[in-house]
């Protein structure tokens, strides 16, 4: 399954992405390091190879618990977006995480990629709620949820182990009812109307 809009493309990650993924990650080690998930010292988790990571992601995808995507711009690998922690039953919930090559940051690529992923989750996947957890210091990611009109729903103390420590996160969410027209439509309308017009669902932060 491939999702596309405005030159931004989401497609499933594969083993064939190994060399490009490694090259981009190595070139962006300083840029991405402060936001990367880590394992606590007492954890049994071991560092994973790219191949093991993709195998795990694809196994989770087959089980319906994850959607692992590569972000491309005009056919070029620029980042990664993962829909994870998919819960069914009475929850119909998932969370979204992402990273982008520093050379492509600030160009609205991740914003459009998240809009594509959320519309897919609210449409064919049939989910009801999408959540994004962001460290308060991560201003680039905060700008993404602001532009898309995610609603801030809470503050989670020591929520995830990031860059060697348990870090606080701000929690943002959208439900299907928040974007009946679709998140991509909202984004396109905002781009046409400019920053002077605020969506009624958009956080006032």
Image (cartoon, rainbow, N blue to C red):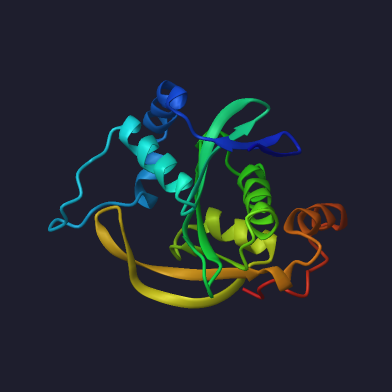
Identify the residue at image location x=54%, y=53%.
Answer: 140
Residue 23 position, x and y percent, is 41, 24
Q: Nearer the viewer, residue 65 or 13?
A: 65
Q: Nearer the viewer, residue 67 or 9?
A: 67
| Circle count | 0
Q: Is residue 113 left or right of residue 68?
A: right
Identify the residue at image location x=52%, y=62%.
Answer: 94
Residue 112 position, x and y percent, is 68, 47
Q: Nearer the viewer, residue 91 or 200?
A: 91
Vertical placement of residue 59 versus 78, above or below: below
Quarter holding the C terminus is bottom right
Q: Is residue 61 left or right of residue 180?
A: left
Most distant residue in the right direction: 193
Identify the residue at image location x=36%, y=42%.
Answer: 56
Identify the residue at image location x=51%, y=36%.
Answer: 101
Residue 47 position, x and y percent, is 23, 41
For residue 161, which quarter of the picture? Answer: bottom left
Quarter holding the N terminus is top right
Residue 58 position, x and y percent, is 43, 40
Vertical placement of residue 178 versus 190, above or below: below
Most distant residue in the left direction: 42
């Amino acid at each position: 399954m491939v999702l596309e809009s405005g030159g931004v493309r989401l497609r499933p990650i594969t083993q064939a992405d190994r060399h490009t993924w490694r090259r981009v990650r190595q070139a962006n080690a300083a840029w991405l390091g402060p936001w990367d998930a880590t394992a606590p010292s007492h954890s049994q988790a071991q560092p994973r190879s790219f191949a093991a990571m993709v195998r795990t992601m694809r196994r989770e995808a087959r089980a319906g618990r994850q959607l692992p995507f590569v972000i491309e711009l005009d056919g070029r690998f620029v980042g990664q977006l993962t829909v994870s922690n998919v819960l069914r039953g009475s929850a119909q919930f998932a969370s979204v995480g992402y990273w982008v090559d520093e050379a492509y940051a600030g160009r609205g690529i991740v914003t459009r990629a998240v809009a594509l992923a959320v519309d897919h989750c609210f449409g064919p996947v049939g989910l009801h709620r999408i959540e994004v957890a962001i460290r308060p210091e991560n201003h680039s990611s905060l700008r993404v949820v602001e532009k898309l009109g995610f609603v801030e729903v809470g503050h989670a103390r020591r929520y995830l182990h990031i860059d060697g420590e348990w870090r606080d996160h701000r929690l943002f969410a959208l439900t299907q009812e928040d974007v009946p027209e679709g998140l991509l439509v909202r984004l396109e309308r905002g781009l046409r109307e400019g920053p002077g017009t605020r969506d009624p669902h958009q956080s006032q932060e």
